[in-house]
Image (cartoon, helix red, strand yellow):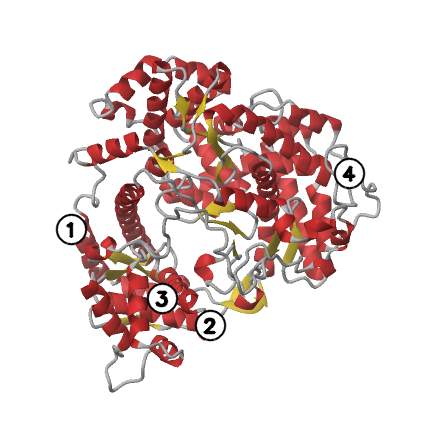
Amino acid sequence: MKEYVGQLSEILQTNPRGTGGPSHGGLVILRGNNVEKEDFDEIARTLLGARFGGKKAAAACFRAAGLVTARYRWNLTWRDDFSLGAYLIGCMNIAGYYRPYLDFERGTQPEYWLEVKDNGILEFPETDQPIQYQPDLDWVDRKVGIGNRLVKPSHPQLKETVWDPFSLSEEGDYASAALSTHAGRMPWMHNYLDNRRRDHSNREWWQATIRLSKTAFEVNQELLALAITIDQDCDRRLPEDIDGFVERKNALEQRRVEENIAELKKKDRKELTEPEKKILHQFLNNFHDLMNLHRSVLGKRKAFERTIDKAKEVGTRIFYNQVFADYRGRLYFKDTGLSYQGGDLQRAMVQFPEGKVIKATDWKFLWLQIANTWGLKGVWEQRVADAKSMQSDVLRYAKSPVETYDEWSQAPDKWQFIRTCFEIHALLDDPNYSSHLICEIDQSTSCLQHMALVMGDVDMMKKVNLGPDYSDIYQIIGDSLKLKADVSSEHRRKIAKSALVPFGYGSGVKKIAQEYDELDLPYLNTISSKDRWDLAKMVVEKIEQILPTAKDYKNLMKQKAADLIKQGMNEFVWDSSSGFEVHHYKQKPVSDSKAFRPIFYLGNGEKARLQAIEPSTVADKEHLKSGLPPNFIHSIDSAVLHFVVADSDIPIAVVHDAYGVRVADASQLNQLFYDKLLYVYDAHNPMLLFDSSIGEIDPDADPIRQSELVPVPYPFHKNISDEARALIKNSQHALT
């Protein structure tokens, strides 16, 4: 490994342009900060311990720059970050560690991607995403760089407007918290009954962050051994790449020349003839599909190897996750390759170290886990019954997982499925067995539920599983679609769900059409890209027809945004009920003519210019308006999660709006979730909180109402309706 460090360090210190030309801007930055020989060695070690394969080159540049600036606590401009990163990654290309290649996204300028060229660099221990063996509660510091922010900012945004909630002392005391950065704008901030909550460390979002940081995990050794055994079977292991990739790529490169693709790309689309449009469109589609599949297959293989390596490294030790939030309040574990927020294998691999004996009433959650990981749909009681009918197969799989792999690997979440089979087998053998399995309790259509609650639409609440009765909105919409061929009920549901999820998160027809491009269903594979676009448009129209309040909600929030922009606001800042400050910025990118394009060494004696989205000082008002509806919903959903985690006394893992708990704790989590969902709407009223915190105050709002259980901290309060309250209290299907 020393030779790798020495080689990269030497390249970093040497001007790759040669002595005759000016130094690269990145090298100028390093020299200007008085980087010495030993510092170059340390920078080389830091870079070699990072993983840039499968990443876009521009994103990798900012990541590399963030690691170095964090190490030395430099505060660079956006352009200096980009220049430094382009130099660092370019030097790794020169060293032969990565191979950059061009990919043409549909309808966009070409972008460089990185793939690993020398697998020897993967032997370096990861420096940027290390496993934690103690709960690391004081890692947060606003000066440690983009890679270690407690709150990941919205993008694109000026560096000077990026918000950090904490002002740390020189000793790094994470509990030294700043008061609200916008208290002067928020009259309700002065109305807290308990003045301590003006301090971030006394707010539920921060308490939830600390609790998740203290949550311990371990590796399930039985599953690790099984994964290693399966991987040793050439017929069953994940492939290294797609069959015939090199030949297919070479054929496309030949087509690029023969069909004059480079010249066609330079032309304005209006200047292209219809045959030229067809040639260009077909080539870009073929090239994009091949490279996307290549990255997917390669990425899955590398992710598998990384998880196995990390699990071996951990062994039987207990480990922890560093936690951060995005700008809406969503909580995330850092990507270490071994966390409950990873893919199927990672979720199956990790468990809670402290087990708990389950009761007879807890078994339904085990069977529900079998149903969900096997892909069963319908009312949860029916899914449990269907899963129970699989008991003989479940036990057979658990007893002989290698021999039965071809059967149980058909499960959508095969590793979590077989892990649950192991648990059921152990529990049936020994009723006093202490269960360590993490059982996932997921929210059902949470974005749509929050839209219904915000708007007070009881009918929509019932359609999206608030209340005692089950409603499969995905199936309802799927069955209503007029398709050009016979499509099974199951696949109709998938078509609807693939649209409803991005729709709930604020996306439109374009994003849904992209989802359909990637979704592997026979019907979607047989229709053209235009037909998939038309299908996406039809599904959106059907969603808005069946759930008109969802459209009304989006229009309402867009109008609020437009009114606020007219009042002179170029960003939206508000508090959620858990005390998290949402800082929603969206700047227009610098125009192409003024864009900064640092030199990027390709490693073959050639160089290129990279481009990234550089934020300007001008607010992107249209994106601010379109972003407010989903971001407001995200902030409410996050607040519910903050309250649940902060007030729980059980180990919890989270994945977006889903919760992972021990089987024996699932009932407790279920009740806690509904209590906190009701509390967020009944005690805080998110819409009134938003209006008051951002500057809009309803003069007709009810005065503050005292609660017997918890003091209500906000003065502008209106109860949700009695019917809505009853639906939440009697819900059985919001969590599945």
Name the residue located 39 percent from the left edge and 63 percent from the top edge: 67
**Side (left or right) of 198 relative to 91:** right
Q: Amino acid at mark 4?
A: Lys
Residue 327, how many percent across, how many down? 55, 53
Residue 675: quadrant of the picture: top right
- Give the mark nearer the N terminus: 2 vs 1: 2
Please state which of the two labelled residues, at mark 1 or mark 3, is closer to the viewer. 1
Point out the frontmost of discs 3 and 2.
Answer: 2
Residue at mark 2: 76
Which amino acid lies under the numbered mark 1 shown in the image of this protein?
Answer: Glu
Check the image and report above or below for 12 versus 275.
below
> Can you identify the residue that label 3 sits on?
267
Q: Which residue is mark 4?
A: 718
CA separation in Å, label 3 and label 2: 37 Å
Marks 3 and 2, the one that precedes in the sequence: 2
Q: Compute the Cα span from label 4 to label 3.
A: 58 Å
Distance CA(mark 2)–CA(mark 4): 47 Å
Q: Quadrant of residue 342?
A: top left
Q: Which of pointers 1 and 4 indicates the residue nearer the eye?
A: 4
Q: Amino acid at mark 3?
A: Lys
Q: Which residue is mark 1?
A: 247
Whether residue 563 sits left or right of residue 98 in the image: it is right
Distance from disc 2 to disc 1, alpha carbons, whole Å, reads 44 Å
